[in-house]
Amino acid sequence: MKTVLLLRHAKSDWGQPGLSDFDRPLATRGMNDAPRMGETLDLFNTVPDQILASPAKRAKQTAEIVAQNCGYTGQISWHPDFYGGGSTDLISALQQLPSTVGRAMLVGHNPTMEETAANLLCGDGEGWASCLHIRMPTAALVCLDFDIRRWEDLVPGEATLRWYIIPKLIKAIT
C-alpha cells in the first residue's frame, strides 16, 4: 500500500504588487492554516515519509511549516517543475520514488493540485470520471491510497480517496 497526500499551498499574500508570483509569501491566514494542517497529519497518524514541493515561496513556507508541525524529520525535496508544471510532472515524481517510501506528500499550486487529484482518482477522464472535480482551496489536503508495492507501478485512475480536509473544517470542529 502506498499513500499520496496532496496539499495545496496555504493562503498567499497579494499585498506587494511589484513582487513576482514565484516570490509571494504566505498571508497571515496562510501562516495560521499551515500549522493546523501539519497538526492534522499528526492527529490522523499520517505523517509523510517524503515531502516533495514546489520551490515557490508560498509553497516552500507551507511545506516547511506543515513538516515542522506534523513531526516530519526528513529533508524536503524541491521540484522546480511543480511550479507551472502539470499533473504529469507530479505523477512522474511519485513514480520515481524508492519503494521504501510508503507515504509521500506533494505540495504545490492550483490548478495542478486539483488536476492531479482527479487524474489519480479517475485516470484519463473517460466517461463519468471526466465529471469528477475535487475543489482544493488554499491549504486543502487530500489523502489517496494505492494498492501497490512500488511507486513505479502507480497508475492514474487507481487511487482510493481516504479523506479530504480543509482548514475551515478544522477550525469549525476544534
Image: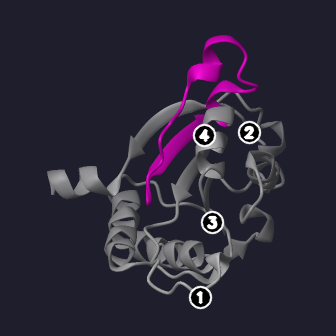
Q: Which residue is mark 1?
A: 18
Amino acid, disc 1: Gly
Amino acid, disc 3: Ile
Do the numbered discs 3 and 2 sit on residues whose CB atoms are within 8 Å?
Answer: no
**Crowdedness near tag 1: few (<14), some (14–19) or many (≥20) residues, C-alpha within 10 Å:** few
The x, y position of residue 62, in whole percent, is: 50, 73
Q: Earlier in the sequence, mark 3 or mark 2?
A: 3
50 over 30 or under it: above or below: above
Find the distance from the CA under tag 4 to the CA under tag 2. 20 Å
Magenta highlight range: 120-146
Q: Earlier in the sequence, mark 3 or mark 1?
A: 1
The x, y position of residue 133, in whole percent, is: 54, 32
Q: Secondary structure at mark 3?
A: strand
Do the numbered discs 4 and 3 sit on residues whose CB atoms are within 8 Å?
Answer: no
Amino acid, disc 2: Arg
Q: Earlier in the sequence, mark 4 or mark 2?
A: 4
